[in-house]
Image (spheres, rainbow, N blue to C red):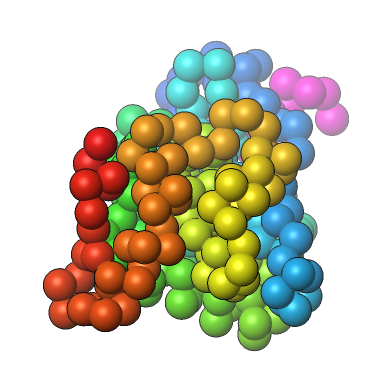
Amino acid sequence: MSEAAQNQEYLDQSDLSDKEDAETLDLSPFKVDWLDLEFADCHQKLGISGLPGCRFKDTWRSMTYDMDCLKEMKIEEVFCLCTKGDLYMYRATDLLKKYAEAGINCHHYPIDDGHVPEMSKLMGLLDEIKMCLTSGKKTLLHCYGGVGRSCAVAACLLMLLDPTMSQEDAKQRLRDLKGDAAIRSVKQYNFITDFRSILTKYLEHPENGTGENRSVSR
C-alpha cells in the first residue's frame, strides 16, 4: 500500500472532504513518554503525551491512527485535561467518544491552558490517577502539548507519592522526561513551588475547596 493510500485509510470520516489531508497526515508512532514511579513502590509508569488526533499548525495527526497506537500500547485509562474549547480548536471534538469506542476509560478533568485546577479538583484527579496505577492499569495523562498542564499535575503527583520529594526535584524529573518546556506557565511553576503549603492548608480546611494562596494567581 502506498503512503498516500495508507494516509487516506486513516482519514477521520469528519474530514474526508479535505482532499489534502491524505497527503499531510503524520502517521509516525504516537509519542508517549513514561514517568517512572518505582521510587514510590508503584510498578506502573505514568504515560504523558500530547493530544491524540491533533490537527493544528504543523501538527496533523489522524485520530483513528492515534487510537490504534494507544490500543497497541494497551492503554486502559486516560486522563484528559483539555477543555472542550481545546478539542474544538485542535479539531479533536470527537476525542472522548473515540476513547469509548476504543474501549479506553476516559477521565475528563478540563483545565484551562496555562492554569492549574483548584485543590479539591486536583486532589480528586490525583486520587483517581493513583487508584488506576496501584490497580496495575496502564494509564495516560495528556493535555494539548503534554508539557504544561500534564506536567504540572504529574509534578504534584510525584510530591504526593513521596512526601520527602522537593518541588525542585519534582520539576526536574518532569524536565528530564519532557525537556525544558515542561511546566510552562508562571501560575503552574508557582503552584508547584508552593504545593506542599497549599496542600497542608487544604487538608486542614478541605471545606474551602482550594487551599490557595497568593502564588496561584501571580
Above or below: residue 167 compared with residue 205: above
Q: Which of the 4 image quarters holds residue 130?
A: bottom right
Residue 200 vs residue 174, the one in the foreground: 200
Judge whether 108 appears above or below 91 on screen: below
Q: Is residue 178 above or below residue 82?
A: above
Task: Look at the image and say whether residue 142 sits in the magenta stretch.
Answer: no
Q: Residue at x 41, y 58 (%)?
A: 195
Q: Is residue 215 left or right of residue 67?
A: left
Q: Determine whether 191 is above or below 20 in the image.
A: below
At 63% from the left edge and 24% from the top edge, which residue is drawn? 25
The single residue placed furthest to the bottom in the displayed view is 135
What residue lies at 67% left-to-right and 32% top-to-bottom?
Answer: 179
- Residue 13 visible at all: no
x, y percent for residue 107: 43, 67
In-front residue for pair 213/120: 213
Q: Is residue 126 left or right of residue 140?
A: left
Quadrant occupied by the N terminus: top right
Q: Position of residue 214 (x, y in %)?
A: 22, 47
Where does the magenta region start and end? 1-12
Residue 9 falls inside the magenta stretch: yes
In depth, the one of 7 and 125 nearer the eye is: 125
Return the residue found at the far left. 208
Residue ID at (55%, 81%): 131
Among the 4 quarters of the image, the one containing residue 119: bottom left
Q: Quadrant of the C terminus?
A: top left
- Regarding residue 36, the answer to whether it shows in the image is yes
Find residue 7 and report its horizontal and vertical position in percent: 68, 28
Q: Locate residue 182 relative to residue 209 in the image: left or right.
A: right
Give how far across and how far down residue 154 sits, in percent: 55, 56
Of residue 58 and residue 187, the one placed in the foreground of this image is 187
Number of numbered discs overlaid on the protein picture: 0
